[in-house]
Image (cartoon, rainbow, N blue to C red):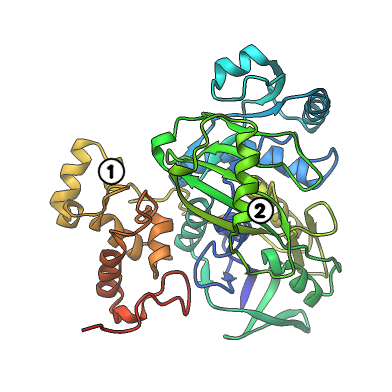
């Protein structure tokens, strides 16, 4: 029996697991997908928001500001790329200027530090590619960028190293109580736990209902993105937002921590919770939105498009509450959920303690991850040592991102290691470059076949059933 069972291995579930793993507890995370970060987290803008957008007094506002404060230190501990690049909300007419002033006042009330409204000349000196009819902008120097799936993997990996058990391909179908214990029914059997945490993302409404908790409606909202080649990676330094609308923060233009540029997302309401298709209408919409604010957005440099689903609800705020004694909801975590995740974890642990969970600090909690540096990131001395210890670091597999066979083997052998082509891609970026795996995918499959000792035909691209090969052609 587990002390705490967490449902969901996205950024929120992994952050909660890691926070709890600082203590002497028997913890499990059950996840419907085949890997960490299979849902909303894997297709996310990766923006660490400063905290001016959420309305005053909401959980979103409180946890956004606290999460933003925590991010840089947490990324250092977990060796995850993070850049404090700042953000601008730009205004091109009087109506948008008024909205910028509203955001500024809201940000001050929310406790966002160092916010200021800047004028045209200062904006263009910071970002010369912004359209020169800009009037003013809200500058938030505390905003940052991170790779969302790398962050979730790092949190999960670190939790695993500290004793948390992860159970994948495990879908929860029912939850009931037997005396004081929770009985969590899944397709992989029944798990018993003293405490349950609902961090099920897009399905958190269903889990809340199973826990006899608050009834709310999920409004699955698809957002499409385009990722550009690094050749125009210096187009903007800061994250550039338009003024927000009722649908969200709008179509942004932002660098990534790895030197690309991306645009998006739009916001399409749909019934389907799994459909992450992209459509030409959506791509045109985000292109138009980005080109309105920034010069030089040239579609010739797009290397891929993708979409994610936000866990939007009809409540309008995060739902972090106690559905019944012994359980905690961390539900409806849409933006700024990525930013807020570390603060949500603190709040969930506090709510568990309020219900009787006793925390005893571990004597040997391992806060840092080790052996995470890729060959391309090493200095000359480190490269020499790595090659002496493992000659596989001498074979380049992904030419675009300069990823070696040693890096890929490490990604497979690490705690919660990769078991698919996209699992390797998310961990070490093999296949993330200009050719999008056109060169390296067959070689990545060779390595997965050897390391996992499975037939190559059974290797998935991204989860069960997504086979790449069907058989031999000759």
Taking the spot 59% from the left edge, 17% from the top edge, the residue there is 124
> Residue 85 versus residue 95: which sits nearer the camera?
95
- Few, some or many C-alpha atoms within 10 Å of disc 1 (few <14, some 14-19, many ≥20)? some
Check disc 2 and report its element: helix, strand or loop.
Answer: helix
Q: Is residue 395 visible?
A: yes
Callout 2 crowding tier (Cα within 10 Å): few <14, some 14–19, many ≥20: many
Look at mark 2 in the image and give the residue it sits on. Answer: 345
Residue 245, percent from left and from top: 79, 41
Disc 2 from disc 1: Cα separation = 33 Å
Give the number of callouts. Answer: 2
Front residue of this view, candidates 406 and 29: 406
Quick one: quadrant of the C terminus?
bottom left
Q: Against 103, is 164 above or below?
A: below
Q: Quadrant of residue 422?
A: bottom left
Rendering coords of residue 229 (x, y %): 41, 42
Residue drawn 25% across and 83% down? 473
Helix, strand or loop for disc 1: helix
Quick check: 367 above or below 100? below
Asked if the residues shown at circle 2 and circle 1 are in contact, with their CB atoms under 8 angstroms apart, the answer is no
Task: Kindly identify which residue carries mark 1.
Answer: 376
* In front of the other: 40 or 356: 40
């Amino acid at each position: 029996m587990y002390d705490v069972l967490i449902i969901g291995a996205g950024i929120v579930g992994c952050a909660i697991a890691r926070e709890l793993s600082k203590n002497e507890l028997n913890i499990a995370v059950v996840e419907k997908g085949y890997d960490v970060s299979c849902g909303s987290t894997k297709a996310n803008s990766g923006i660490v928001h400063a905290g001016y957008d959420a309305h005053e007094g909401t959980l979103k506002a409180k946890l956004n500001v606290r999460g933003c404060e925590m991010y840089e230190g947490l990324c250092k501990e977990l060796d995850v790329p993070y850049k404090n690049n700042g953000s601008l909300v730009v205004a091109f007419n009087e109506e948008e200027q008024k909205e910028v002033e509203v955001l500024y006042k809201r940000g001050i009330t929310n406790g966002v530090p160092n916010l200021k409204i800047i004028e045209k000349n200062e904006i263009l000196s910071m970002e010369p590619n912004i359209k020169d009819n800009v009037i003013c902008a809200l500058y938030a120097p505390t905003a940052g960028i991170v790779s969302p799936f790398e962050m979730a993997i790092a949190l999960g990996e670190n939790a695993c190293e500290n004793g948390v058990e992860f159970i994948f391909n495990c879908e929860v179908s029912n939850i009931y109580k037997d005396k004081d214990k929770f009985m969590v029914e899944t397709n992989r059997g029944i798990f018993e736990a003293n405490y349950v945490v609902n961090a099920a993302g897009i399905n958190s409404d269903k889990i809340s209902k199973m826990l006899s908790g608050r009834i709310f409606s999920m409004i699955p909202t698809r957002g499409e993105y385009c990722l550009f080649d690094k050749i125009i990676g210096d187009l903007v330094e800061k994250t550039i937002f338009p003024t927000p609308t009722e649908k969200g923060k709008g179509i942004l233009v932002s660098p990534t921590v790895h030197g690309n540029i991306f645009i998006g997302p739009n916001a399409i309401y749909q019934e389907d919770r799994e459909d992450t298709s992209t459509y030409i209408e959506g791509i045109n919409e985000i292109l138009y939105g980005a080109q309105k604010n920034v010069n030089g957005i040239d579609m010739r440099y797009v290397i891929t498009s993708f979409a994610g689903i936000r866990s939007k609800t009809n409540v309008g705020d995060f739902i972090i509450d106690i559905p019944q004694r012994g359980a905690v909801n961390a539900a409806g975590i849409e933006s700024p959920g990525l930013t807020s995740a570390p603060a949500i974890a603190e709040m969930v642990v506090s709510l568990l303690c309020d219900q009787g969970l006793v925390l005893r600090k571990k004597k040997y909690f391992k806060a840092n991850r080790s052996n995470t540096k890729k060959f391309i990131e090493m200095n000359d001395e480190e490269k020499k040592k790595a090659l002496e210890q493992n000659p596989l670091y001498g074979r380049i597999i992904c030419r675009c991102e300069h990823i070696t066979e040693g890096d890929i083997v490490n990604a497979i052998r690490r705690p919660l290691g990769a078991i698919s082509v996209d699992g390797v891609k998310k961990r070490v970026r093999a296949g993330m470059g200009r050719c999008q795996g056109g060169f390296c995918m067959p070689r990545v499959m060779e390595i997965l076949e050897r390391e996992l000792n499975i037939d190559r035909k059974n290797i998935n691209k991204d989860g069960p059933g997504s086979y790449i090969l069907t058989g031999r052609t000759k």
